[in-house]
Amino acid sequence: MSENIKDVVPQNLVKIQKNFAAFRRDVTDRLGWLETIRKQARRNMAAMLVMMHGTAGVYEERLNQLEIDRIVKLEDRMVAVEARLR
């Protein structure tokens, strides 16, 4: 009976060691996967910021052009009104 116990203990220890190794591999794989996801998310955020800056620049240009057009039209109206008053 005691021989069976002595034989079982090393087998159990080997099984535990294998389980730890499998767990460690699994954790390492998951951490690698999370790192990949993090890099992709960071790259996507940077791309979104670039697009937002570009869009804001285009929007600002359009607003400036609309303001310039509005001012030109007002000046043309004033010239026309002044011409009628003379």
Image: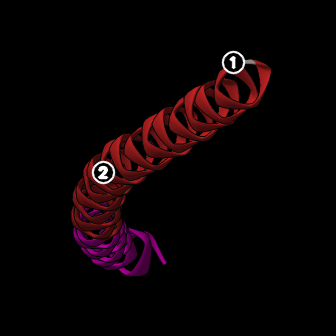
Q: Which residue is drawn at 22% across and 71% down?
A: 25
Q: Given the image, on which type of amino acid does mark 2 rest?
A: Gly
Magenta span covers which residues? 1-29
The disc placed on residue 54 is 2
Q: In which quarter of the image is residue 44?
A: bottom left
Kindly report the secondary structure that dominates the magenta region of the rendered protein: helix
Secondary structure under tag 1 reads loop
The disc placed on residue 86 is 1
Q: Where is residue 40 in the image (x, y as percent from the top left)?
A: 27, 65
- Answer with left or right where residue 67 lies relative to residue 65: right
Of the 4 image quadrants, the one containing the C terminus is: top right
Q: Nearer the viewer, residue 59 or 41?
A: 59
Q: Residue at x 25, y 56 (%)?
A: 35
In magenta segment, residue 6: yes
CA neighbours of label 1 inside 10 A, class few (<14), some (14 to 19), many (20+): few
Secondary structure under tag 2 reads helix
Above or below residue 48? Residue 56 is above
Q: How many marks?
A: 2
